[in-house]
Each structure stands twice: as structure tokens, then as C-alpha cells.
Image: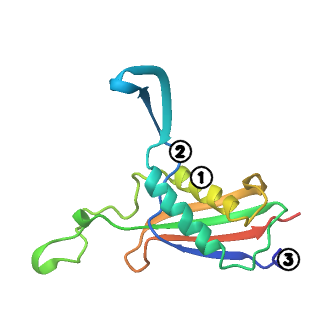
Amino acid sequence: MPRAGHPVIIDVYGTPAPQGSKRAFAVRGKGGIPTGKIAVIESSHDRVKSWRQAVIDAAHEGDGSVLRNAVTVQMTFYLKRPLGHFRTGKNAGILRDSAPRRPAKMPDLSKLIRATEDALSDALVWADDALVVSIDAAKYWDDAHPPGASIIIKEAEA
């Protein structure tokens, strides 16, 4: 466990991906005949899998201790700004005046948090994500910062 008062800081590089949206479909048997069963899968399975692995890899760079007490978490997600936000031609690389300042669009912040919390559990940063008693999270387009997340975990005040 980190020494009291010392936060766990994890910097993750990769494309943040949401977890939580599901897609259902009818299972088909031989000859494409419906079996009557329904399968449910994560909508962005491949992206979530790679994001969670990036979080696990970044978390494993820590001291390996497992948090077992209440914690507060700060998560800042950095997203890649869409190319359509930039001007073209001789002004390429300059933001359009109409470009939104914050990513008030998908991916949902709450679903980014869910994927990241689950990955931190898988990485054994904490015994269980139920230990999180407070969370402060935000998402930004930040051209000066590579896509990813900055995570700060602190022991909660008694």
C-alpha cells in the first residue's frame, strides 16, 4: 500500500474506450436457423479490450501494492480531436472557430470511468472498485497531450 498521504499516479497512453453499451443478437445454428437464444456482447469489444490492457500495463509500473481502504479517484481523459475541427489548406492545423472546446459527445464519460475502474481492479491496484467513495472525472480534447488518461488515487479521509 502506498504510504499514507502519497497518491498513486497512473498515466495511461492509448485511446480511451467506453464500457457498458451492449449489443444483442439472435444466435443462429446450422443453416442460419435461429436457435431461440440471444447473445449479448460489448458494442466496442475490441476497443475496450485494448484500452483496459493499456490501463493494466500502466498500473503494473507501480509498486504492486493493493489498496484495501476507501479511496478517492481523479480521472482525466484525453481524446484525439476529430480532423473536421481543423481548417484545411494553408491553415491546416489551426482550429476552426466553430470547433467545440470540450468533447460533449461520445464516448460517455461514465462509460470511460467504468472501463477504467474495471481495468484497475483487474490490475489489482485496489481490492475492489467498491472502495471508490469519491470520483472526479473529466474528458478533454488536448492536442498537446497524447490520447489516454491521467489517474490519481488517494486514500480517503477517515
* Residues marked 2 and 1 touching at CB (< 8 Å): yes
Is label 1 in a helix, a strand or a loop? Answer: helix
| Residue at horizontal 76 percent and vertical 55 percent from the top | 128
Residue tagged by mark 2? 20
Does residue 16 sit above or below 150 in this rendering?
above
Using the image, tell me which numbered label, if any, was put on residue 22. none
Identify which amino acid the numbered label 2 is placed on: Gly
Q: Is residue 66 left or right of residue 119?
A: right
Closer to the eye: label 3 or 1:
1
Distance of mark 3 from mark 2, alpha carbons?
33 Å
Q: Quadrant of the C terminus?
A: bottom right
| Residue at horizontal 44 percent and vertical 49 percent from the top | 44
Residue tagged by mark 3? 4
Closer to the eye: label 3 or 2:
2
Identify which amino acid the numbered label 3 is placed on: Ala
Identify which amino acid the numbered label 1 is placed on: Arg
